[in-house]
Image (cartoon, rainbow, N blue to C red):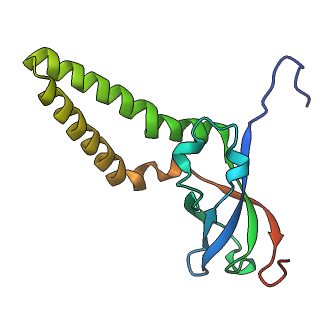
Amino acid sequence: MTQPDNMSLEIEYIEHEALVTEVDLNNNFITVRIDDPEECGECPAAKLCQSKGQPSNVVKIYVPDAQKYHKDDLITVRGTERMHRKAIMYATVFPCIILVASMVGIYLLTGNQLAAALSGIGIMLLFFFILWLSREKIAHEFIFNVVGHIERAGEMK
């Protein structure tokens, strides 16, 4: 069955090279470090993800065949563009909205700029603490897949 030309079901993906840092054979998980700064050049959140050239992300990925991966393997992982946008919303947009709304609200209630600023900071800390506590509940929204095995440990140039 073919799709009409005006209907596109194409899903945009973001791929990164990642280094396997740990293999959990019992639970079929691999832990990878994504350190792909050249791929982030056009991303609006690139500066937020990178920390002065340090590896940006450590991700745990479920793989049905964990035994074929080894520590220090170089692989390609893929996430969706939708997942990327959702991460930007959680990390930047929602906190900014909450910060501005809380500071304006407190200032309108009290007329005190210091109270508004301090409560804004406190509410931001609370937001990120709640986000951290919720990490297990929202983890299913941020799933990467392994799409390529580039180099095996020991075969790197």
Foreground residue among 115 and 138: 115
Q: Is residue 28 left or right of residue 104?
A: right
**Image height of 41 relative to 109, above or below:** below
Question: Picture coordinates of residue 15 (x, y %)?
Answer: 73, 50
Q: Quadrant of the N terminus?
A: top right
For the point 14% across and 29% down, the residue is 114
Hey, which residue is sitting farthest front in the picture?
A: 52
Count of numbered marks: 0
Where does the image place residue 26, in percent across and percent down from the top left? 57, 81
- Residue displayed at 30% across by 41% down: 127
Q: Residue furthest left?
A: 110
Q: Is residue 62 left or right of residue 139?
A: right
Dividing the picture into quadrants, the one containing residue 9 is top right
Q: Which residue shows up at 80% across the image and 78% down it? A: 152
Q: Is residue 74 above or below residue 80?
A: below
Out of 117 and 92, give the one closest to the viewer. Answer: 117
Q: Residue 149: percent from the left, percent from the top?
A: 80, 67
- Residue lying at the far bottom in this picture: please name it: 154
88 to the left or right of 111 = right
Quarter of the view holding residue 62: bottom right
Q: Which quadrant is home to the C terminus?
A: bottom right
Q: Nearer the viewer, residue 34 or 65?
A: 34
Q: Is residue 53 above or below residue 107?
A: below
